[in-house]
């Protein structure tokens, strides 16, 4: 088992091991004083993993309640959140109990936000079951729900009491959802870790399974380091956004329907590399992206995408901050007036 400790405002451990799901009860017993746990999950993950988690929690002496909502991003909303609050009230869950987020980023984000707000805050544990959730959303303490006005507009920083990461659960992931997570995995290599990039680039969607525990641990370590340096996202945490300025623009151009987040980020990274890297670096990145069935570009003109860049909550006034990796393994934060960015990208 690999253990990665996060020294944030609350210190906690991330445990990574194939099959660790069956030990979640014993692990959680160490991390919380709770007697009761409420497992929050979606219908797909419920059918696959709830029974094992419940069994492990009960064997460790927890009383277990369960709330299941329909899978998918539309569930990450205030209506589901209110149902969760009602469910917690109906089952007399108190401040000293613990929520269990079992699922992908949608489950993790909404459960984390419920834990941050219900009774002004209670313990929660992340048990991420998608690649994206294991390497990204379950680490770092950002929780949120979406509003009709945009994604992640209401949220809180709330660190879990621990994260229990079982790479074996990824075996049931549909191929395109696995690829989606690989977009972020490749990003970690690009921004911080040339050796990790080499490792990923030497494999493809099929063969990477053999080294997944190592790869996931490497990604989590990078996210941990960045989060420790900037827990509340006021500076360095921004480097995690490599590929995301164009990526968000792509997602938004297609109304979040055509390209998944990881696909859009992959294309965004390649398009940014084409502007800032040597042809050799750009080619290596593109090859790697293709090996995981992700796109290297999108059929839209830059002048259509640029106006959509930075239209999220991270754009400060007329200045745009974006991330450049001139070489593999090193990211820089660049700031430019939005108008200059437009001219430069469209040139
Ligand atoms: P998701 O939670 O919707 O999961 C994707 C799909 O996979 C769902 O249909 C789910 O039911 C299914 N699934 C999950 N685990 C499975 C398994 N083991 N086997 C088979 N199917 C499984 O989406 P996601 O990609 O995990 O996460 C996306 C969300 O994460 C977005 O809402 C995004 O905003 C959020 N996010 C948050 C952070 C953060 O720092 N908090 C970071 C990145 C992304
Ligand atoms: Mg992302």
Image (spheres, rainbow, N blue to C red):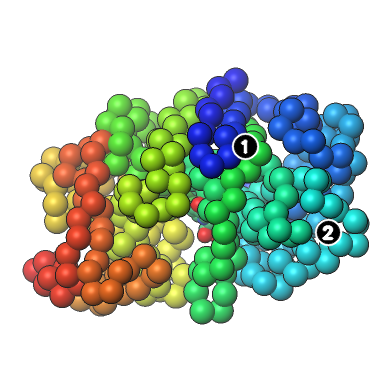
Q: Do the residues under discs 2 and 1 have CB atoms within 8 angstroms? A: no
Q: Is residue 61 above or below residue 304?
A: above
Q: Is residue 339 above or below residue 204?
A: below
Q: Is residue 22 above or below residue 226?
A: above
Residue occupied by mark 1:
163
Image side of residue 315 versus residue 124, left or right: left
Percent coordinates x, y for residue 22 in the rendering = 76, 29
Tell me the SS state at disc 1. strand
Tell me the SS state at disc 2. helix
Q: Residue at x 37, y 59 (%)?
A: 264
Viewer-nearest residue: 35 or 206? 35
Residue occupied by mark 2:
88
Percent coordinates x, y for residue 288 in the rendering = 31, 41
Q: In the image, is the residue at mark 1 within 8 Å of ligand 1 by its beta carbon? A: no
Are there few (<14), some (14-19), or many (20+) residues within 10 Å of tag 2?
some
Q: Residue at x 57, y 59 (%)?
A: 156
Question: The C terminus lies in which quarter of the figure?
Answer: bottom left
Q: Residue at x 20, y 76 (%)?
A: 303
């Amino acid at each position: 088992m690999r253990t990665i400790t996060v020294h944030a405002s609350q210190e906690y451990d991330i445990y990574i091991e194939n099959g660790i799901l069956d030990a979640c009860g014993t692990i959680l017993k160490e991390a919380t004083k709770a007697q009761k746990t409420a497992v929050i999950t979606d219908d797909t993950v419920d059918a696959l993993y709830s029974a094992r988690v419940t069994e492990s929690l009960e064997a460790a002496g927890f009383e277990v309640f369960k709330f299941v909502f329909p899978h998918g991003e539309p569930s990450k909303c205030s209506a589901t959140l209110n149902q969760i609050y009602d469910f917690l009230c109906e089952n007399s869950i108190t401040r000293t109990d613990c929520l269990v987020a079992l699922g992908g980023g949608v489950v993790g984000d909404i459960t984390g936000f419920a834990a941050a707000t219900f009774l002004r805050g209670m313990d929660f544990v992340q048990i991420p079951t998608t690649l994206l959730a294991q390497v990204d959303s379950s680490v770092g303490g950002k929780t949120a729900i979406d509003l009709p006005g945009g994604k992640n507009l209401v949220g809180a920083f709330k660190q879990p009491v621990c994260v229990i990461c079982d790479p074996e659960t990824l075996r049931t992931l549909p191929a395109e959802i696995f690829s989606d997570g690989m977009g972020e995995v490749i990003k970690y290599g690009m921004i911080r870790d040339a050796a990790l990039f080499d490792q990923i680039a030497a494999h493809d969607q099929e063969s990477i399974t053999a080294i997944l525990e190592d790869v996931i641990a490497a990604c989590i370590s990078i996210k941990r380091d960045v989060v420790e340096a900037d827990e509340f996202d006021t500076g360095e945490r921004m480097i995690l956004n490599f590929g995301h300025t164009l990526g968000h623009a792509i997602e938004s151009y297609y109304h979040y329907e055509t390209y998944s987040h990881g696909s859009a980020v992959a294309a965004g990274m390649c398009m940014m590399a084409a502007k800032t890297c040597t042809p050799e670096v750009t080619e290596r990145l593109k090859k790697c992206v293709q090996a995981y069935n992700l796109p290297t570009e999108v059929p839209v003109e830059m002048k259509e995408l640029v106006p959509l860049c930075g239209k999220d909550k991270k754009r400060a006034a007329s200045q745009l901050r974006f991330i450049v990796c001139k070489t593999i393994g090193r990211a820089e934060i660049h700031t430019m007036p939005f108008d200059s960015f437009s001219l430069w990208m469209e040139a």
